[in-house]
Image: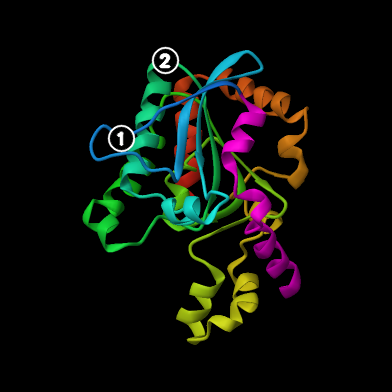
Amino acid sequence: MVSQASDIVAGSRSDQKTNMQAVVDALFSDFFACHGDQISGDDPAIIAGLATLKGHPVAVIATEKGTTLEERMATHFGSPEPAGYRKSLRVMRMAEKMHMPIITLINTPGAYPGADAEAAGQGQMIAKNIREMLTLKTPILTIIVGEAGSGGALALACSDTIWMLEHSMYAILSPEGFASIMWKDAHRADEAAELMRLTPNQLKAQHVIDRVLPDESVLDENFQQTMADELAKLSDQTISTLLAKRQARFRRF
């Protein structure tokens, strides 16, 4: 069991999952990126914009780790800053106004914990995103592609439907961080990973997520239709029903 959890953690951090822009380009047509938060600047750790999925308009938000050292330094290895969360919220509000469903793609160890980010309101923006997502009057689908760590991931995942790839993880902090807190020994990360119950199947059994998908399914030609079908199912519900179910889901935790 320990090796299984540790293998999933390792798979969630695979370099093959770091180029989210390529995933966005493969899944969506006519992607138009929005840059900047209209306050402080543009955070490259968040890709956000409008696109079409099987001919239907959607808003797309994704975390980006980057593929080169320079890109990874710029994105803090996929850890968004406050400007990134503001940019994502800007696009989500735009989607609500234009009655577009939202799709979020997540691969982040968590929000950037630097002192400058904290001074710029990191905690406030995470809380604001969570609050706003729970009241957005449009369907939201989240797909966890790799890592999904702490409030930094939750701020993009307060959704109606949540899917995870089979080698992905969703947790309050990293196994290394958990082991350091519990035992003062980060080398016990594999043991921590099992205790944390962060694997897709464990989370599905607890009804935290809705579906586990093979890693390769994201780039499968049928996956676009799978997403479109899910959004259509959500769109068939009244807004009041959608919001009630979304809010009830997160109150359970």
Give coordinates of residue 113: x percent, y percent. 35, 61
Q: Quadrant of residue 168?
A: bottom right
Q: Nearer the viewer, residue 183 or 69?
A: 69
In the displayed structure, would residue 25 be above or below residue 113?
Answer: above
In the displayed structure, would residue 231 be above or below residue 248?
Answer: above
In the displayed structure, would residue 192 be above or below residue 18?
Answer: below
Is label 1 or label 2 in front? Answer: 1
Give coordinates of residue 250: x percent, y percent. 47, 46
- Mark 2 = which residue? 98
Q: Is residue 253 visible?
A: no
User: For residue 37, which numbered disc appears in the image?
Assistant: 1
Q: Nearer the viewer, residue 19 or 55?
A: 19
Q: Main secondary structure of the magenta part?
A: helix
Give the secondary structure at mark 1: loop
Residue at the (34%, 39%) spot, across then down: 42
Residue at the (70%, 26%) spot, across then down: 224
Report the amino acid beneath label 2. Answer: Met
Residue at the (65%, 76%) spot, across then down: 190
Q: Which residues are magenta?
A: 1-28
Residue at the (37%, 43%) spot, across then down: 43
Quick check: is 179 in the magenta stretch? no
Q: Nearer the viewer, residue 161 or 220?
A: 220
Assess disc 2: are there few (<14), some (14-19) or many (≥20) residues with their C-alpha within 10 Å of its C-alpha: few
Q: Are marks 1 and 2 in contact (CB under 8 Å)?
A: no
Quick check: is 23 in the magenta stretch? yes
Q: Is residue 163 visible?
A: yes
